[in-house]
């Protein structure tokens, strides 16, 4: 039976050719216009009904432009498959290559899946997507050899690699698609799989749709959708201006945002990667100074241990919690990991691991007495004090001033109580000398206690508030000599002199 199907393609349009059904058979024109990449060519060779082999090739990638209408003639074979066809009224000079018609073998089914490190149906800019195209001869009666599978590189992505595939490039040398040749035979259960990997372009957003996979002229029925998600984490120190370093007991508000910019849905695993360590090291606390839980503590505990979050199409999820700075030891760095599941490796892409760094300002002071000659100092002896100043924060401190509160104390020779600059993790010392006076001695025959306080101040960038550190040191002094003891001592000295 000879049948004719007329198909019209609009000049400079952007639509696929219509499919024409004849009984249980159909012909599909899969040609896109205006530079899109979907022209198909298929050759089907079948023997009589019950034949055991069928060879089919397709080409759905080449760029072209349709400028004329075309008439297609095909003949239906006795086995229900198409044997031949011809194309009419195609201006090949203007097109460059002849537009072809797909002959569909309805028994071939094409499915596709996408795998990313971000999570099911999700990906971030700079992340990679590995597509797996599965092809199956559902009839499982005839062996199909040399079945050509093709797929285009999705928009907003760049080709990385393909397993055993042939790259198809445009005139600029960019890979725009991949071809494979597979066998659907009894030996492999009439199935085959091919894979290729792309990288999501920087600053991409929305949904990456891949619906251009073909096998044996049969197009993928259900498109593969992958949403691009944007992850971020911010830290705001309450009561501080932007750029002003944080200090001990400041409250930090952390905000984690996961934004699904596309229309695919799925699950992602989210964990604050460093919060538990910061808490265990005594840097951060989820309690105030009175031991009460801060706002968002439950959210912080959940994100500290990791949790799975469901994201609907175009949905944004936000997690907010507070933490108090309990101790400072350099900058406070924190980050969040967003990945497919708890057991997956952490992604290397920074967008999957958004982080932030809080600048800090803190100074510690340690005062000690050195070169002790005895447990308690006598009248007239000199005590040597060494003050060590350490910058515990992440910024350089300027104009660090060491001030002693003890009357009569003086700087050791060559020493200065002004430290012009103190780098992070740097320590410097200042030495003071003090001579024990009568008022420093103990009363009523008991040892005295001399307490010496020191105060250190420093200028902090982007802040009008001085940074202050303090410490004190206590030493023992002998008791004052009473009047009776003085007379006894004087008598003893005279007696010793007379004996001489």
Image: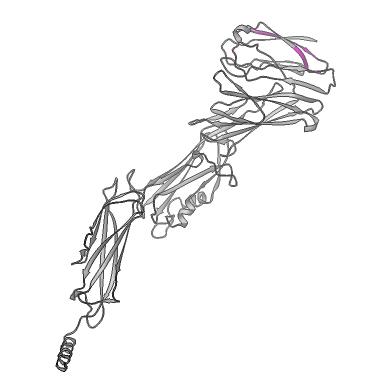
For the point 27% across and 66% down, which residue is it?
Answer: 385
Horizontal side, residue 161 vs residue 500: left or right: right
Quadrant of the rendered image containing residue 448: bottom left
Q: Is residue 222 above or below residue 115?
A: above
Give the answer, above or below, for where 385 lies relative to 193. below
* Residue nearest the viewer, comparing 117 with 308: 117
Relative vertical location of residue 190 with respect to residue 379 in this rendering, above or below: above
Residue 70 is inside the magenta segment? yes
For the point 82% across and 27% down, which residue is it?
Answer: 141
- Front-most of 310 and 168? 168
Which quarter of the figure has residue 192? Answer: top right
Quadrant in the picture for the N terminus: top right
Horizontal and vertical percent for residue 157? 55, 28
Is 240 magenta? The answer is no
Q: Which residues are magenta?
A: 60-84
Query: What percent of the width, then of the height, locates residue 283?
Result: 42, 55
State left or right for residue 79 relative to residue 352. Answer: right
Prevailing secondary structure class for the magenta stretch in the rendered image? loop
> Which quadrant would the C terminus be assigned to in this image?
bottom left
Q: Up-down: is 352 above or below 111?
A: below
């Amino acid at each position: 039976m000879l049948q004719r199907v007329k198909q019209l393609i609009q000049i400079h349009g952007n639509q696929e050719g219509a499919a024409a059904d004849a009984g249980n058979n159909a012909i599909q024109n899969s040609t896109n216009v205006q530079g899109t990449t979907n022209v198909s060519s298929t050759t089907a060779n079948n023997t009589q009904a019950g034949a055991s082999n069928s060879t089919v090739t397709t080409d759905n990638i080449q760029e072209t432009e349709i400028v004329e209408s075309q008439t297609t003639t095909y003949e239906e074979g006795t086995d229900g498959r198409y044997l031949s066809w011809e194309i009419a009224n195609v201006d090949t000079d203007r097109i460059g290559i002849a537009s072809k018609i797909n002959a569909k073998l309805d028994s071939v089914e094409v499915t596709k899946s996408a795998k990313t490190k971000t999570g099911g149906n999700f990906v971030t800019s700079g992340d990679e997507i590995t597509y797996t195209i599965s092809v199956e001869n559902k009839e499982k009666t005839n062996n199909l050899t040399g079945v050509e599978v093709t797929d285009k590189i999705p928009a907003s992505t760049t080709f990385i690699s393909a397993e055993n595939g042939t790259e198809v490039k445009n005139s600029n040398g960019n890979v725009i698609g991949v071809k494979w040749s597979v066998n659907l035979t009894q030996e492999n259960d009439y199935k085959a799989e091919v894979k290729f990997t792309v990288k999501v372009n920087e600053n991409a957003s929305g949904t990456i749709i891949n619906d251009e996979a073909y096998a044996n002229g049969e197009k993928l029925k259900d498109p593969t959708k992958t949403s691009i998600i944007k992850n971020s984490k911010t830290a705001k120190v309450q009561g501080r201006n932007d750029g002003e370093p944080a200090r001990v007991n400041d409250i930090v508000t952390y905000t984690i945002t996961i934004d699904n910019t596309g229309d695919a849905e799925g699950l992602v695993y989210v964990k604050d990667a460093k919060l538990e360590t910061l808490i265990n090291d005594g840097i951060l606390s989820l309690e105030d100074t009175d031991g009460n839980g801060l706002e968002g503590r439950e959210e912080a505990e959940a994100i500290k241990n990791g949790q799975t979050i469901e994201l609907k199409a175009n949905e944004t999820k936000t997690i907010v919690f507070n933490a108090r700075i309990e101790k400072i030891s350099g900058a406070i760095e924190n980050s969040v990991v967003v990945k497919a599941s708890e057991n997956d490796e952490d992604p290397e892409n920074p967008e999957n691991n958004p982080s932030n760094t809080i600048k800090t300002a803190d100074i510690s002071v340690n005062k000690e007495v050195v070169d002790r000659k005895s447990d308690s100092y006598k009248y007239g002896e000199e005590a040597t004090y060494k003050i060590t100043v350490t910058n515990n924060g992440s910024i350089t401190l300027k104009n660090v001033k060491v001030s002693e509160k003890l009357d009569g104390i003086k700087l050791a020779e060559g020493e200065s109580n002004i430290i012009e600059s103190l780098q992070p993790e740097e320590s410097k010392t200042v030495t003071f000398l003090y001579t024990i006076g009568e008022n420093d001695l103990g009363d009523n025959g008991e040892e005295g206690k001399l307490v010496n306080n020191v105060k250190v101040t420093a200028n902090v960038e982007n802040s009008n508030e001085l940074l202050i550190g303090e410490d004190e040191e206590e030493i023992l002094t002998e008791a004052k000599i009473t009047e009776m003891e003085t007379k006894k001592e004087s008598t003893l000295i005279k007696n010793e002199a007379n004996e001489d």
